[in-house]
Image (tube, helix red, strand yellow):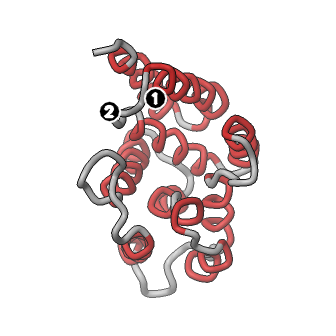
Amino acid sequence: MTAHEPKPGASLQDAYLAAWRFAAEAHQGQIVPGTDLPYLLHIGAVAMEVLVAHALEPLPDPLLAAQCALLHDTVEDCGVAVAELERHFGPAVAAGVLALSKRKDLSKPEAMSDSLVRILAQPREVWAVKLADRITNLQPLPAHWNTIKRAAYQEEARIILAALGGGHPILAARLAQKIQGYEAFLTPA
């Protein structure tokens, strides 16, 4: 039994719900930028992408993938300590979430490159979370984003796909489709 598996007698659902509740508490009060919707909508969407992809093309450790998906923004956006994640969910989940977190002491391009290097050193379940995160983020963006910023975001998605696409074929194909569909957001209204 690995540290992120449920304790004896606990179900996979219990382990999933523990991560979901932890994420809900960590993100309490946050909203999706440019909306009135709770940020937990994004977290749930990333987890849903991972779980549906797993149903179509199984991952070796779906619990690791699900917990990392639910917790992926807790360090970067909520200031949760990696040690706290490790205490609650084990070293594999903590390492996965840390890899998915961009370092704030680096420039934006350096932070993305650094994060991708760290993700590539993780199991493919963590790669799947990053692919799912970008799939979820390639939705209509805040109205205040100009065409240049939107184009840069699309280019970042291409870099993520090139680096991590081998991690899960279903998510790679879905991200490629989202990147193509994102063209509609690059045309000024």
User: In the rendered image, which residue does mark 1 sit on?
Assistant: 175
Q: Looking at the picture, how far across and down is residue 63, in whole percent?
A: 49, 63
Image quadrant containing the N terminus? bottom right
Q: Residue at x 36, y 19 (%)?
A: 181
Q: Which of disc 1 and disc 2 is earlier in sequence?
A: 2
Total number of numbered discs in the rendering: 2
Q: Looking at the picture, how far across and down is residue 26, in whole percent?
A: 44, 72
Q: Residue furthest left?
A: 36
Answer with left or right where residue 33 lies relative to residue 91. Answer: left
Can residue 85 be seen here? The reply is yes
Closest to the observer: 110 or 142?
142
Graded by Cα atoms within 10 Å as few (under 14), some (14 to 19) or many (20 or more), the crowding at tag 1 reads: many
- Residue 64, by quadrant, is bottom right
Which is closer to the viewer, label 2 or label 1? 2
Closest to the observer: 11 or 185?
185
> Would you place residue 86 above or below residue 77 in this image?
below
Image quadrant containing the C terminus? top left
Q: Residue at x 51, y 59 (%)?
A: 73
Answer with left or right where residue 8 lies relative to residue 43. Answer: right
Task: Evaluate if marks 2 and 1 touch, with contact meaning CB atoms under 8 Å apart.
Answer: no
* 3D distance between C-alphas at marks 2 and 1: 22 Å
Q: Secondary structure at mark 2?
A: loop
User: In the rendered image, which residue does mark 2 sit on?
Assistant: 143
> Would you place residue 42 above or below residue 70 in this image?
above
> Would you place residue 47 above or below residue 167 in this image?
below
Q: Secondary structure at mark 1?
A: helix
